[in-house]
Amino acid sequence: MTTSQTSSTRPDDPAPAERDPRPAARGVWRFIPGFGRPTIRFVHRWAIALLVSNVGIVATGGAVRVTGSGLGCPTWPRCTDNSFVPHEELGIHGAIEFGNRMLTWVLIIIAIAAWVAVLRYAGSARRDKWTVTLIALGIPFQGVIGGITVLTDLNPWVVALHFLLSMALVSAATVLVYRLRPYPTPAEPAAVDADVPASATRRLGVYLAWLIYVVTWVTIYLGTVVTGSGPHAGDVDAPRNGLDPDNATQLHADAVFVLVGLGLAALVYARVFARPQQRSALVFVALLALQGVIGFVQFATDLPVALVIAHMFGSALLLIGATWQVLVARATDQPRVDAA
């Protein structure tokens, strides 16, 4: 028996399927729990933390605005011309604005941890690494845009850009959570109606999902236009965009009606053809209904602070739902191969 044969048949040598495919931890990372040899569940949890923190910063940013604290720290990157922290004369508004700025650093720490976890995970695809890198770079860039909003005295169009970029990070983080999930994609069911080509059925679902995603973005953008014309400027002296609030609100409501129709169409499609995206379509319709109720009530009650914050939070959840529908539709846009 040769030497190679002897070494390959040792009783203590694990079978190929039992060997850990992850590279051995080296350098300083071996001293940090989880980061030395990241598992898929470990990486997925950091992706979820990145998504949750990005949604959280949207809500806290809304709190800054509706409490009139947008210029609580009147300059940037310092809070005042002579200090990085607020002083007593700035009052509660200074504390709220400074607190939101500090939360950005928490988000940056989470983004760095997620970035390291994804890059060190042996199973990460190239697009996963690019996605988490863009998110990590986008967060400090968002901080710069936030600073520009302060330096422009809360120009409503710059404020809207700041919010939309935050929502883009939420959508990107949703993609990362989906792609790194430790459970498989829902199985493709057999076609219910044999007269309808399976490929056409699948493509219809993909087109519906993308259309919902685009209209969701349009609806969110028009929501920023409504906010820019309304009373919540972020500061009593901040400018408005000059548009009529009633007309802007009606345009936003029209987009919502279109989105409701598309959401119901996607749900009916998924139910009739027994598509895997039934759950994601149902969740999206439920989120849309809740968001619609909040929007109507806040309009009818003259925009109370709590409901405005809830509506902004709901916008982030709605975009997550729209993004998830696209991901599920694309993942299942493959013909089913039945066993012979």
Image: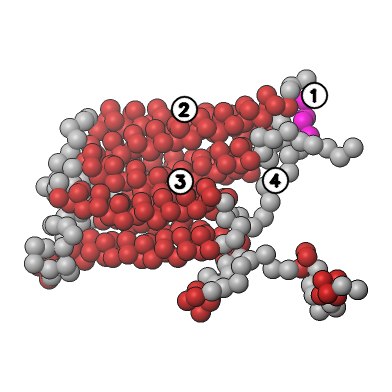
Q: Earlier in the sequence, mark 3 or mark 1?
A: 3
Residue drawn at point x = 61 percent, y = 34 percent? 267
Mark identifier at residue 186: 4
In three-dimensional space, the C-alpha distance between marks 4 and 3, rounded to whole angstroms, equals: 21 Å
Give the number of the mark in front: 3 or 1: 3
Q: Earlier in the sequence, mark 2 or mark 3?
A: 3
Residue type pointed to by label 2: Val
Query: Residue 236 in the image: x percent, y percent?
Result: 14, 49
In three-dimensional space, the C-alpha distance between marks 4 and 1, rounded to whole angstroms, equals: 21 Å
Residue count near mark 1 (Cα–Cα under 10 Å), binned few <14, some 14–19, many ≥20: few
Residue type pointed to by label 1: Ala
Quarter of the image for residue 275 reads: top right
According to the picture, the residue beneath numbered tag 2 turns out to be 258
Residue drawn at point x = 17 percent, y = 69 percent? 85
Residue range (magenta): 190-194
Whether residue 96 is visible, yes or no, is no
Circles 3 and 1, Cβ within 8 Å, touching? The answer is no
Quarter of the image for residue 227 reads: top left
According to the picture, the residue beneath numbered tag 3 turns out to be 171
